Each structure stands twice: as structure tokens, then as C-alpha cells.
Image (cartoon, rainbow, N blue to C red):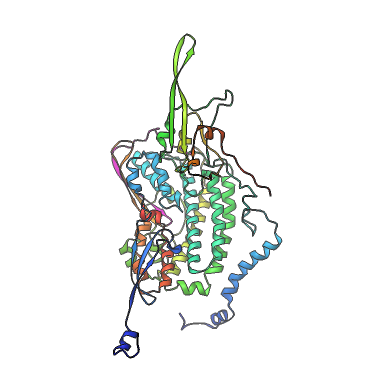
Amino acid sequence: MSSDAPNASEHVFEHTEMLLNMGPQHPSTHGVLRVLLKLDGETVVDLDCDIGYLHRGVEKICEHDTYPMITPYFDRLDYVAAINGDLVYVEAVERLMGVEVPRKAQYLRVILAELQRITSHLLWLATHALDIGAATIFLYTFREREEILKIIENFIGARLTTHAFRIGGFEWDANPEFERDVRAFLDMFPGRIDEYETILSENRIWLARTVGIGVLSAENAIDIGLTGPVLRASGVKYDVRRAAPYSTYPEFDFEIPIGETGDTYDRYLVRMQEMRQSIRIVQQALDGLPEGDVMAARVPRVIKPPAGEVFHTNESPKGEIGVYLVSDGTNTPYRLRVRPPCFVNLQALKQLAIGHLMADVVALIGTVDIVLGEVDR
Amino acid sequence: MSERRSIGSILRRLFLVDLIKGLAVTLRYSARALVEPRDGANPLQSIYTAQYPKERPNIPERWRGAPKLNNDPRTGESLCTACNVCALVCPVDVIQVSHASREFRDGEKVKKKKVLTTFVFDTSRCMFCGLCQDNCPTLCLELTQEFELAVDSRAGLVWDREMLEKGINVVTYKK
């Protein structure tokens, strides 16, 4: 631009908006999420998420698979918390069939689901901190995550996509070392959470990057339909484990941590507290583990639930995951619909990011904790 | 937040207390790494990394790894009855079973028996959910503890009956 142009000063101070493509191949979008950013300098003016890069049509596939064949697909929705995905599907089918699952199986399910919640939060903490620039914590959380994965691996036979539950209970009872391993982990883990908090909670770089970033009021959070830690950080005490209890959760004593301001730092604190509460649940479930079978006695070989429909929800680590299942009495579902928490929580990103800097978008994608397998299905 | 800063918080900021506390955690692990022996995958030790492939991982008994077709240990014949349940129950259709009808003499009568001819297992599309293994009525098809399934070509991922009965060659590395 030449300086002798008549309206040079106007050009210099003109707002110039620019479109920036972030993703789908970007390390901090946690998968194949494409974010279209409208930037004014470094400030985000507008934002749009382009999803669907991981769409596999799981809901349609389920319509021509028999009921037991669908369970592995639920591992692959939220693939960092496969057990929680399994649980909601298996419980939905059991509710439709009227199967009573033995108490031991229910307790073991709770233990595994809560351990998986810890792994999911650990992975969230690792990647979120890594996005912001704290690389140390990544190595520490993955060490503890590995311990849980070993417990799951010894019990179920797979690490990530576990296919843990069968309709009616479990394929196998817990391995003999299961209780010892879980107790060893429970003894070790609270000290490790303290370590993470020593590294992060007061760290001034961490505070500068998270406090006051992406503030979401309780009314806004409810309006968007958020669930899970993102909603609770805004101060809404809503947890499916308490609001609509499933499995044996009413028998356990645990608290629902909530935040105050609803910023990124609060969402971090809520998830850290949730890990501590999960330890409490696992401890209680392990202390009160009943004896008996792990498979319901009256589950037929060919599963044909009676015609009808059911909507069942669970508290997954990301939020409220729901399954709507319609049966027409045959061995395949007539319709299966998943209510994914990640998809709904992702809708908050626009509100969170507008007005913040481009670099904060990375922190904000991390803080809503999405898994693209579940967003796109 | 910045208006009501106490003397204590100013001093904490000045002497970088928050950063030093975090660094102390890291340094403690670094110091322990110098003196502790290398014992892979012990969560209480500071070096946690397992030294694969020199150190073999501890694969659990229930691990769902490479598929295998078991033979009857007494007769050496395949346990597979070509019932096709594994192929039917597979969510991703990786199994193809074909059979022939063979006549055999049972006392006076001549009976017909289904005999397995070929068994194709496409490990490239398998998701190791274990449904085939759970539903096998004769415990013939089994997902073993072998996990090193990498091959040079895509065709090598499709396993025929011979491969399934023999199992894969495991290369072991010296320490």
C-alpha cells in the first residue's frame, strides 16, 4: 500500500476479516474436525464446525445386524470410553427384554465403567494440557491410564475397543487378580492426581490460558443442551447417575462436583474432582462386591426382544449418552438412534470461542472434550 | 483478581513458587530414574516404558489376538464342524467357511458328514470383538495371545486354513 494514497489512514485501521481453515488434519482438533474460523487479526469473529469426516453410518449398520453384533459398534462411537458406550446399549436391550442382570455383574459393570471414566478424563487432561503446551503431564497421565488399561485388558481381553459386556451380563467372570489389581491402582492413584494438580492447578501459564477463557453461563449451557462435566462446570448439578439412576448407582455414595464461573479452568477442576469421585465409587463397589453369577440365566441364544421401544440414557465421561431402540420383534432392531453427548457439546464451541484469540480455540476444543467417533457416528 | 492481591501472593509470584513446585515433581522423577533399576512397566518406578521388542509384553490369557483353528489333540483332525456360526455372527463378515459332504460307515449304515474344506479369515477387516470365539460350539476357533500381525503385503492379511491351523511365526529379539 503506497503512503500517498488519499485514504491511507482508513486502510491501515480497516478491519480485515480473514477465513482460516483449521483441520480436518490438525493435531489439536482431536480427530477429523474441520473448524472454519473467521478472524479479525487474531480474534475470532465467527466460527463454524464442519463435521462428518468420520461418518460411518453406524445407526444404519445397526439396522441389519443382530443385537449381539451391535455391541462392538458401540465401542467405536466414543473410542476412548468404550465401556461406557457398551453399557448404555446393553442396558437398553436388557430393559427392552426385561432381563434381570445378576448383582455381581452390575457391580463389576459399575467398577469397569468408572475406571473407564478415569481413563477418559486422563486422556482428556493429557491432550488438553498438550494442546496448551504443558507436555509433561501427558506422560504422567498416560502412565496411570496404562495401569487401568492393563486391568481392563486382563479382565476383558482388549484395551481400547473392549466389547466388555454381553446382553445379560459378562462372557467371563472377573479374572482372579482383578480385585488385587484394582485395589493396587486405587492406593496409588489419589497421590498421582495430587501430582497433576501440583503441576497444573497453580501454574501461572496454565491459569493464564484457562481462567476466564470460554465462560458459559448456566442458562446458556442448558439452552444449548449440554450435559456432563461441561454443564456441571457452569454450576448445574445434573448427573444422570443421580437424576435418572441406572445399574446400581443409587447404592453408592458420591458427590457431583460443580463449578462456579463455567470457564475452562472450572471445567478442568470439575473433571479432576470427578476422577476422585470415581475412585470412591470403585472403592465402594469393590468392598461390597456380591458373590454369584455374572450372566443372567434366562437369556436366549437368539435375542429377539418383544416389539416395542426404549430410550435409555447413561452418564458417559463426556455427558449424557442415550440410545433409542425400536424393536419389531425380529432379531435385528427396526431403528437405533444414539444421542451423542459429544455432538451436542460441540455446538457450544461457537459461543465459547467468539471474542477470544485464535490460540484459545485450541484450548476450547480441548475443554469441551469431544471424540469425533461419537460426533460423526 | 489483580486488585486484591495479598503480600503472600505477590511473594509467591516473585519467587516463582508455582513453577518450582511443578518442576520439583518432574525433577523428583528424573532423579529417581538415575538410581532406580530399569524394570519395565512397574507403575511405582519412575521409568515406566516397556522395552519392546527386547522385552516381551505380558499378554493376558484372555487377549483377543491372532485367530487360530484348533485341532483335536487326540486325532489331529480339525475340531471345526463347518457349522458356519462364526461366519453368521461376525459383524464385519471376515469369515468364509466352505464344507463338503463326506460319506462314512457307522456299523451297517452309511452316513453323511459335513467336513470342513476351506476356511478364510480376513484379519485386515477383523475388529477382534471375539464374537466368533464366544459362539464356536466346539472351541475350535480361538483368538490367541499372538498380537504381531504385520505382514509385507495386503494379500498376506487374508489367512487360509493352513495358516490358521499353523499360527504365525513369532520373531524374538535378543536382549
Closer to the camera in the image, B85 or A144 = B85
Residue span colored magenta: A293-317
The x, y position of residue A148, in whole percent, is: 54, 52
At x 55%, y 80%, the residue is B13
In reply to whether residue A298 is colored magenta, the answer given is yes
Q: Is residue B36 left or right of residue A19?
A: right
At x 49%, y 62%, the residue is A127
The main secondary structure of the magenta stretch is loop
The x, y position of residue A185, in whole percent, is: 57, 53
Seen as rendered, the residue at the extreme top is B108
Image quarter for residue B103? top left
In the picture shown, does residue B134 fall above or below A272? above
Q: Is residue A176 left or right of residue A328?
A: right
Q: Note whether residue A216 is visible.
A: no
Image quarter for residue A316? bottom left
Q: Note whether residue A214 is visible.
A: yes
The x, y position of residue A24, in whole percent, is: 40, 61
Is the N terminus of chain A in the top left, top right, bottom left or bottom right quadrant?
A: bottom left
Q: Is residue A94 left or right of residue B121?
A: left
In reply to whether residue A166 is colored magenta, the answer given is no
In the picture shown, does residue A248 fall above or below B106? below
Image quarter for residue A195? bottom right
The x, y position of residue A258, in whole percent, is: 42, 64
Closer to the camera in the image, A143 or B5 = A143
